[in-house]
Image (spheres, helix red, strand yellow):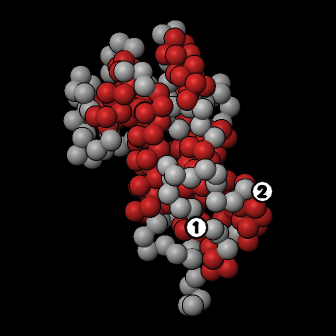
Amino acid sequence: MPSTDPYLTLTSSLPYPGDLFTAKETPCSRYKLDDRLRMLTAEDATLLQDIEALLQWSHQPIARTDGEVVALARALAPSLRNDTLRSVVDHRMNQRTLVAALRRRKRGDDAPPANVPWGYSRWLDHIARHWREPAFGLTREFPWLPEANRLLDAEDSVALERVLLGANWAWLGQASMGHDFDFEAVVIYVLRWNVIDRWTSYSGDAARDRFHTLVDAGLAGFTDVFNEGSTHVGH
């Protein structure tokens, strides 16, 4: 293999993730995954930790506000040294922002003012302009969005979780093309591992309870709409 493949041993040691919705467990334990990740350089290990800290709600305090999440994303952006890493982060933040917009609209909110840090996406202005359209005029860019809107309105948290996780899984699979033995391949694998872990540990009853808690709490304020730490839906 060419010397440009710095993580050949690491990536070759990672078990095949398989199919998301037929998985009964993660391809390896988190302990074993972390043990393999020790082969990362200190710089890359820190960057991976920062990416996970932003994208995985389990890594974030429940009380973290929308503004704090947006600030974290902006602070991380300069460290994302190529288009693949930037697109991986942007994709997840786009999805989170769109789901947050659906939730805000469901509870009867108007489009957030431009000076409110409620999401992190290049589509913020577009979303505000198309606030009353079911999919904010973004069906072409995000084909999962109309179905997510329908399921959110129906309060079908289990099906919504499946749609969102499936969209993220498919996108990460596409993003992995051309990345076999590099740091980007490691990042994508870890994020896919997290998706499998999310799905295989998923509890429909608990999700429904958290869904209703989020909707009820959202009527009183804005702080936890974008940061979904209190709900399984939309991870």
Query: In the image, 177: left or right of 11?
Result: left
Q: In terms of secondary structure, where does tag 2 sit?
A: helix
Mark 2: amino acid: Tyr
**For discs 1 and 2, the disc positioned in front in the rendered view:** 1
Residue type marked 1: Tyr
Residue under label 2 = 31
Work out which quarter of the rendered image holds the N terminus and state it. Answer: bottom right
Q: CA distance from mark 1 to mark 2?
A: 17 Å
**Element assignment for label 1:** loop
Q: Nearer the viewer, residue 132 or 18?
A: 18
Q: Which residue is mark 1?
A: 16
Residue pictured at 47% horizontal, 27% vertical: 157
- Place of residue 146 in the rendered image (x, y in percent of width and height, measured from the top left): 28, 34
- Residue 121: where, in percent of width, then height? 39, 41
Considering depth in this image, is 113 or 46 the residue closer to the camera?
A: 46
Number of numbered labels in the structure image? 2
Residue at position x 54%, y 13% in the image: 217
Residue 5 versus residue 44 in the image, above or below: below
Residue 135 location, x and y as percent?
A: 26, 32
For image coordinates 64% across by 51% down, the residue present is 25
